[in-house]
Amino acid sequence: MNHKNRIFTLLTLFILAMFVFVPTASAYDGRSGETVTISADETVNDDLYLGGTTVVVDGTINGNLIVAGQDVTVNGKVTGSIFAAGRSVTINGEVGKSVIAAGAVVTFGANAKVMDDVVSAGGGIETKSGSQINGSLIMAGGQGLIASEIGKDLVASAGSLRIENTVGRDAKLAVGSADSGFTSQSYGPNMPAMPSVPGGLTFGPDAKVTGSLEYTSDKSISIDSSVSSDVKYILPPQDKQIAAEVAQQNTTSNAVFDAIRRLVALLLMGGLLAWLAPRWITSPAEVLKFRPLPSFGLGIVGLAASVPVALTALGAVILAAVIFGLLSLGALSGLIVMAGLPTIALALVAFGAVFSYLCQAIVGYLLGQWVISRTRSEWNSSLYVPVLVGLLILGLLFAIPVAGGILEFITAFTALGAIILLVTQRKSPSAAPAAPVETAPVIAG
């Protein structure tokens, strides 16, 4: 995974964590404003939600802390986890569980102590000397300066990375070249100050990786045995040697095996659908037989609409959860998220199965009927034979380079449109008339 992909993955994990795990709290305290401060003598015995331009937490939070702002500083004690996002995020207190933080600059001060893991993404990430991370540190950023003691693993991707303390277990690193460098201005004006880190991968005099050290970089570097006795260097994926190996592996035989696997999957799924849901094959097939052009056009519209519909549903779930959360109905907010997100995910999986397999089975059924009617028409009395024969032919056609992929999409579009027509006509599979098995479909040829 390259540097940009790692950053995107970590930011995605952070956003999901904010939206999925945070609203499940049954009780919380929420505060917002231009400047939000939790004083040192204040104790909050719930999960705490904070938002503002400047946020400073000096008190004690007996729960999780969820905070977003331009400049976020946590000096107090948090018994749960911290979820933080901002232009600058500074953790300088004790955290009982994990920290997930994203920002232009993320800093763990000298007094920071995190009892579990840290996941962080940003332009610059620094853990100062004296800070402690008892779990693992997973980070992706433009540059990283790791001077804290890490109890478990270090997984890092950065253009510039310097390690100055002990890693309790293994280190897996992906770094840029020695001439790479990042400054505050690399990410726009008025950014917080970043520490100066040499390009590439470097180590301080007290750096030590107790387990194995695996790093990916454009060039290998000399690593002293005092840092690690088990060092492994990996060429980056974009390296010409790796590219040549990948090209060599992408042979005709592999393409044939892929086509065979795809064909077997089509036949298995087609047979399963013919057994479990025969009406979902025959009823749309009848619609497609007599209305092929409207089905094709509606199928394109249906596929194009699937993405905004899914995003709208996701936004509705999040909005409902936030509204109920602001109304102090935390339990209901959590229920909406826990029910809504899996439902959307299940719907997307179901749509993918319909588009990839059911649509092919519908077209395969019509094609199989047409072929069989010209050889052994009595075989059309069974649903399985035309479905499997048609899918066998389609699978072979799909294996044709370029043209096969286009044909596969046309097939899926058309059958999807027939399904939409069937549903919009308010004909359920149980009410729809069965397809006449003795009559061959009207197909030009």
Image: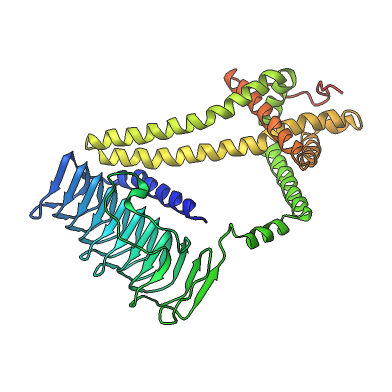
Q: Where does the image place residue 73, in percent across and percent down from the top left?
A: 20, 52
Asked if 11 appears above or below 432 in the picture, the reply is below
Asked if 67 appears above or below 225 in the picture, the reply is above
Q: Where does the image place residue 13, in percent across and percent down from the top left?
A: 41, 50
Horizontally, residue 41 falls left or right of residue 262, namely left
- Residue furthest front in the image: 179
**Residue 149 appears in the figure:** yes
Horizontally, residue 392 falls left or right of residue 350, namely right
Query: Residue 441's quadrant in the figure?
Result: top right
Viewer-nearest residue: 97 or 245: 245
Q: Residue at x 23, y 44 (%)?
A: 49
Query: Residue 158's quadrant in the figure?
Result: bottom left
Viewer-nearest residue: 84 or 121: 121
Q: Where does the image place residue 388, in percent across and percent down from the top left?
A: 78, 39
Q: Residue at x 26, y 48 (%)?
A: 66
Horizontally, residue 396 falls left or right of residue 235, namely right
- The image shows a total of numbered marks equal to 0
Q: Where does the image place residue 143, in percent across and percent down from the top left?
A: 38, 58
Q: Residue at x 46, y 67 (%)?
A: 172
